[in-house]
Image (spheres, grey):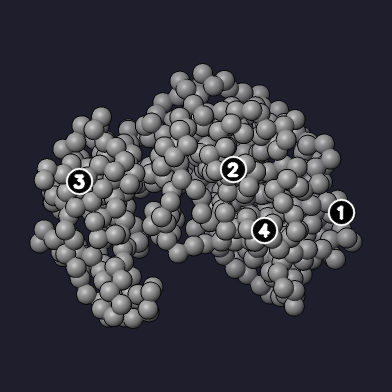
Amino acid sequence: MTQVIAPTPDADDAWFWKGVAEDRLLLQRCAECRLLRHPPSPMCSGCNALAWETLPASGRATVYSWVVSRHPTRPDADPRIVVLLDLEEGVRFVSNLVDCPLEDVRFGLPVELVFVDYDGVRLPQFRPARS
Amino acid sequence: MPASLVDQAAIVGIGQTEFSKESGRSELQLAAEASLAAIRDAGLTPADIDGLITFTLDTSDELLLMRALGLPEIRFWSRTPHGGAGSTTTILHAASAVASGAAKHVLVWRAFNERSGHRFGQPNAAAPPLGWNWYLPFGLDTPAKIYSLTFQRYMDAYGLTNEDFGRYTVVARKHAATNPNAWFYERPITLADHQASRWIVEPILRLLDCCQESDGGVALVISTAERARDLPQPLVRLRHVVDSHLMGGHVMFNYYLEDHSRFEECHSAAARLYGESGLTASDMDAAMLYENFSPVVFMQLEGFGFCGPGEARDFVRDGHIELGGSLPVNTHGGLLGEAYIHGMNNILEGVRQIRGQAVNQVAGARHVLVGGGRGAMILAGD
């Protein structure tokens, strides 16, 4: 059983985790200049506007980098494939690759979004693209 | 006011405790012992110290350290954020303080029980602190995993294997083997030993690619170059010290920078370090490079211009970084061989090399680069 550390939503990212609870991967976009940003920030680095909106991510991404941890201690007792993704929208996102044999992992692998519950902790995860 | 920190300050004293796996005393005591040793090494007394600098992560309180050492008045104190990649930042703060006149003699310390107390290498099982929601829930709970996402791209870009990284470890342990101060004194390893150590993050890091976890403390005293001339130790001038932190980093790492096959902050720091000091990589006689993990040495060799992109593998393989090579690196054994005092013990070795007091002395060392990755300094003699 994979045990995960639950996120602790804060004032700048609670909306993201609310989206995850509703099976949506939301990205933050400046309401003025439309610059996407991740991780979230209260101010746009491009134009310094405070107003922002959310954009549902398509869920399509490619693997930029990946690791498998075999450090034999909790809470990651079951090795997970950790991936650094390039989301189709143009921002990087850390997640896990599921339903994928280790030998199939490679840079540039097209993946798609799924939501997985780990003992009550719901996380956005990715699997090799089927479409 | 000077236009930059070029030739404004000097490191006049260094001190340390023994490096161990269980110090048997408080972190505050380690800090006090190392600090007193540095003050005495500088030929000063506690009453001369009027500045204090450490890491934000250090547990020892400034006022408690003042009470321990008997420092009558502090006129400048500050702390530097993040981890060991910011180790050289403490020296930048200290140089700024003495160059501006805010303080005369600044004490920099870092002391912890990082093996017998809180171990950095153990998985973080706590709720994510601010900013870590994007990493801890996904299993990035140790530094080895966190940095390996970047190392994997570097390896792929230039065709390196874990065995290539092992060649650095062999050198670090070789240097540590003749350093009585090192935890791994008289314990060199072979590449086969490295390859036999267990995977921590496959296929990137084995156990022997990881820095130690250590108990201990180190301290330095920084003064102006002018005052340094009146003090007893051989002059160690701070030719320059720079930091470079780029947007695209987040928490402690740089996932949001475009290209992970190069250490971008290292390149931008190097450009100012050399450009403003008038020195180049070829002027350096030795380098002390922060290495929480062996791949960082390779990325810094390229970032600081000791070789071109992708050339570090052959630079290490050809023996350049060993004693007797063109650029001996981490002559004390570094954080893998000597101890992990958050990078600060690498700065001490740079000072010893310039003074001519290192156990593995580089003959005639005139310039030593000490790199933290996101910052660096050049030390020079008189």
**Which chain letter matches label 1?**
B
Task: Kindly identify the residue that appears in the image at 81 percent across and 46 percent down.
Answer: B366
* Labels 2, 3: front one: 2
- Label 4: state its secondary structure: helix
Pick whichever, B377 or A8, lies toward us. B377
Mark nearer the N terminus (2 vs 4): 4
Mark nearer the N terminus (4 vs 1): 4
Task: Kindly identify the residue that appears in the image at 44 percent across and 39 percent down.
Answer: B157
B310 lies left or right of A112? right
Measured along the vertical axis of the image, is residue A21 above or below residue A33?
Answer: above
- Label 3: state its secondary structure: strand
Pick whichever, B17 or B358, lies toward us. B358
Measured along the vertical axis of the image, is residue B229 above or below residue A65?
Answer: below
Residue corresponding to mark 3? A111
Is residue B40 in view? no
Residue corresponding to mark 1? B382
Residue corresponding to mark 4? B273
Looking at the picture, how far across and down is residue B27, in whole percent?
Answer: 56, 51
B68 lies left or right of B234? left
Determine the image quadrant of residue B107: bottom right
Q: CA distance from mark 1 to mark 3?
A: 59 Å
Quarter of the N terminus of chain B within the rendering: bottom right
Q: Are marks 2 and 1 on the same chain?
A: yes
Do the CB atoms of the residues marked 2 and 4 lie less than 8 Å apart? no
Pointer 1: residues within 10 angstroms few (<14), some, or many (20+)? few
The amino acid pointed to by label 4 is Leu
Residue corresponding to mark 2? B308
Looking at the picture, how far across and down is residue B350, in whole percent?
Answer: 72, 46
**Which chain letter matches label 2?**
B
The amino acid pointed to by label 3 is Val
